[in-house]
Amino acid sequence: MAGWFDPRRTNIERWAYTFQRVTGLAVLAYVVAHIGDTSFFVGGPFGEGPSRASWAAGLSVTESLLGHLVLVMVVLVVVYHGINGVRLILSEYGVIFDKPSRPDYPYRAKSLRAVQRHLIWVAIVGAILAALYSGGLLLG
């Protein structure tokens, strides 16, 4: 995992690789936390005893400013991970690659075409726009 953050490799594909793995771990953490969070709401607001108290406590956390900011970050992470995942699937199946050619000096990565770079930027811009939109809905 230390290689994900190697400063000597600073091209955009390397950063996309790193963020894909980091966002994957963040989505996994969110899903696990979300399952735990929703388990507090089993009885609903009309439950008896501890169920009613856990409902109120859970809503006080998720309906706070911090809860809304976490949800905006979740939108940012999920949208980036999804769009970049589509790029990776297309490259895995060879849809966005050129035909193989002879490696000539100076050696440059033939796999990173302009289409791949553009799709990385689409993932970044799409994630930012989705986060801004969800932030406007939740915070505005």
Image: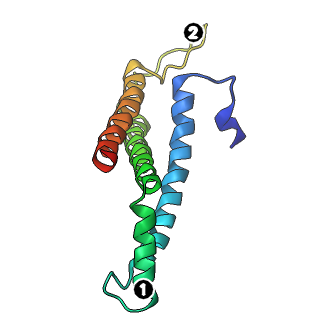
Residue 130 in view here:
yes
Q: Which quadrant of the view contains residue 38?
A: bottom left
Image quadrant for the N terminus?
top right
Rendered position, 58 above or below 16:
below
Q: How many numbered marks, from 0 up? A: 2
Q: Earlier in the sequence, mark 2 or mark 1?
A: 1
Q: Where is residue 33 drawn, in percent x and y?
A: 50, 65
**Numbered mark located on residue 51 in the image:** 1
Q: Residue at x 44, y 82 (%)?
A: 53
Percent of width and height locating residue 36: 49, 72
| Rendered location of residue 124, percent (x, y) | 41, 32
Mark 2 crowd level (few <14, some 14–19, many ≥20, 10 Å Cα): few
Position of residue 11 measured from the top left corner of the image (x, y, whole percent): 56, 22
- Is label 2 or label 1 in front? 1
Q: How is the image coloured?
A: rainbow
Whether 120 is drawn above or below 52: the answer is above
Q: Residue 109 falls in which quadrant of the image?
A: top right
Label 1 Cα crowd, 10 Å radius (few <14 / some 14-19 / many 20+)? some
Amino acid type at mark 1: Ser
The residue depicted at 41 percent of the width and 34 percent of the height is 91
The front one of 129 and 55 is 55
